Amino acid sequence: DAGVIEQSISIPDNDPAGASTDINVEDGGTISAARVTVNITHDFPGDLTIILSRDGTDVVLVEQPDVASTEFMQTFTVSDFNGEDAAGTWTVTVVDGAARDEGTLNSWTLELTR
């Protein structure tokens, strides 16, 4: 089961609220593995914190990644939700923690194994 968000969302500069987008998973089942892939364009990806959330649980996927390119695409394996039901709203939030540059969350995917 996978969800894909392919709309571009602007990441506000130096804003602790960041930019968020959701994937709604309708089919339940016990999660045995979760993977999240993000595709981000940002002048300085090292400013970013990327968070996966569901039902009040926040998991920081990466904080201030060491990336030399303005194109940041990475897949994260997340075990924090293993054993839980897959159904619900999953949210990725990207926070730019520094001033002077902006970016875009180009897309993200959620892959759940049951």
Image: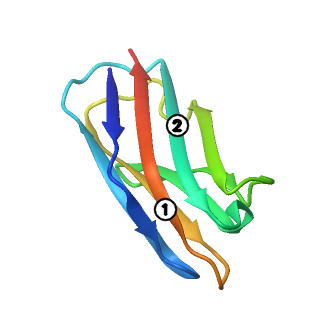
Residue shown at the point (53%, 45%) measured from the top left? 39
* Label ID, residue 37: 2
For the C terminus, the image quarter is: top left
Q: Position of residue 101 (x, y in %)?
A: 63, 78
Q: Vertically, is 69 above or below 9?
A: above
Q: Position of residue 5 (x, y in %)?
A: 33, 43
Most extreme residue toward the top is: 114
Q: Amino acid at mark 2?
A: Thr
Q: Vertically, is 49 above or below 102?
A: above
Judge left or right: residue 25 versus residue 82: left
Q: Quadrant of residue 20?
A: bottom left
Q: Amino acid at mark 1?
A: Thr
Q: CA distance from mark 2 to mark 1?
A: 15 Å
Disc 2 versus disc 1: nearer the observer: 1
Q: Vertically, is 90 above or below 37?
A: below
| Residue under pointer 1 | 104
Residue shown at the point (55%, 80%) measured from the top left? 13
* Count of marks placed on residues: 2
Residue shown at the point (65%, 84%) measured from the top left? 100
Q: What colouring does the structure picture have?
A: rainbow
